[in-house]
Image: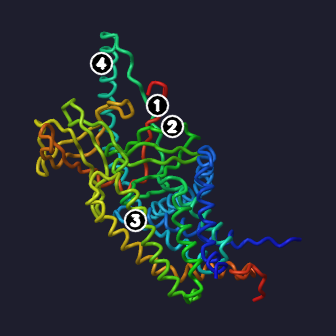
Amino acid sequence: MSTQRFDQARPFATLAIVVLAWVFVPYVIKAFTRATFFEFQAPFAAAQSYVQDLQEYWGQRSRSKEELLEAGRSLAHLNSAYEFSLQEKEHLRVELLRLENLLKLPPLPTHRFEPARVARRDFSGWWQRLVIRKGRNYGITVGAPVVFVGGVVGRVVEVYAYTAVVDLVSSPTFRVAAAAEGDSRPISYQGGINDSFKAPRGTIEFVPADIFANQGQPRRLVTSGLGGVFPPGLTLGDIVQLEPSTDGLFKSGEVRLDPRLSALTEVTVLVPINPEAF
Amino acid sequence: MKNRDIRWLLVLVANGLFIWLNALANHHLAPFAVHLYLGGALVTYSALRLDFRHGLIAVALTGLAFDALEPVPFGTHIVLLGIIHATLHSGRRQFPRDEPIFATVVALIANLFLFLALSFLLVGANPRPGEAWLRLFVDLLASQIVVAVVMPWFMALNGRLLARANLHPETGRRVEL
């Protein structure tokens, strides 16, 4: 009877021993094992992404000459707009340099832009992450900001040999100091409202009471530059709802994020040129 | 030459393929804000068909492979999948464990347990947990439907892999087909 009872409990006893042994494994070994398991699976994600690129390439090859001519014309219009923006940027850069010299300010820390293809999207109710096809081989660092044409994508949280993991701006684990456009006072932003079949949203707290926004008149939310990770002025989303918070001193509300975030195929990593400055 | 018992490795390979397919599906479902969690399917064959030692090795390594891709404490799935494995293994003789329908029901219950355990563990990080549960409910519903549909195929895949290697799942003895 007792032997039979022990036989029934043996799987649980073995499991308890395995779990206890795992608990006492040093952190370094756990971190190494995690990286090993990730690296082992990374080529599969990258291969899937390369196959998609190939599909897109052959899809584009089937387009007619008329369509290509039309695309060329649109591109020419875009190029002329970008030319003008470049001239404007150069003028602003010279002006910034003049002011820095005048006020004897240290130069702003700068980044280099590293475009990367998205290998895998993993958007759940628990987390929102991307795997990109560039890692240590391109000098990507943990904490580097990631952006796209619509603004902030997120922040690099893990870097591997050929891939990196990005925590999205819509993830509940993503927090950043923000500001309403045209206002310098800091606001606390956190991602995390990701309803099914809808564009992602984020939450804001500690909004000054004299800032107003609603669905009809949204106000752009940008990075404040505080903390030094994100350069100031990058778009996070639009403030679409504000209500007084429980303390009565500030407001809290919701931010509508760019719906294109959930279908990203290419992003840009802002790699700090001088990482010690951050 | 000594014959090595690779049952755990074959099940691990099948689980690896399943994890990759799951990630591929989630990549394409991302624009619809729907996510599939299919962890319950990964433990069912090991727990119902393999012996305890090989099953536990396969489940532990699968758990580590799963955790490496997710922002959860490394080892979470060893504990969660291990509990399911031990529970099913200790009571499996009382049930028709060779039946695909029974395996599907077991996978659904296991998936429900894993999903709820992870949700309670992670939902606290959300700024509005109440709203997060609504999204999690939709994800759970989608995941359970997919588990119910793919489980017979996945059990057959594991069975075919072991049959190709001429190995009996429970004893590891060579069997001629």
Residues at circles 4 and 3 in contact by the CB criterion of under 8 Å: no
Amino acid under disc 3: His
Whichever of callouts 4 and 1 sits on the residue coming sooner in the sequence is 4
**Gap between marks 3 and 2 measured at Cα:** 28 Å
Amino acid under disc 2: Thr
Chain letter of disc 2? A
Q: Which residue is mark 3?
A: B35
Q: Nearer the viewer, residue A149 or A26?
A: A26
**Gap between marks 1 and 3 measured at Cα:** 33 Å
Residue A32 percent location from the top left of the image: 62, 47
| Co-location on one chain, circles 1 and 3 | no
Which quadrant holds residue B175? bottom right
- Of badges 2 and 4, the one in the foreground is 2
Q: Give left or right: position of B172 versus B38.
A: right
Kindly identify the residue that appears in the image at 48 percent across and 52 percent down: A131
Residues at circles 2 and 1 in contact by the CB criterion of under 8 Å: yes
Query: Mark 2 falls on what kind of element?
Result: loop
Q: Give left or right: position of A210 versus B163.
A: left
Which disc, if any, is residue A141? 2
Please rate how many residues cluster around mark 1, counting C-alpha atoms within 10 Å: few if below 14, some from 14 to 19, many from 20.
Answer: many
Whichever of callouts 2 and 4 sits on the residue coming sooner in the sequence is 4
Chain letter of disc 4? A
Q: Which residue is mark 4?
A: A95
Which residue is outermost to the right? B1
Q: Is residue A54 visible?
A: no
Which quadrant holds residue B115? bottom left
Amino acid under disc 1: Pro
Which disc, if any, is residue A128? none
Amino acid under disc 4: Glu
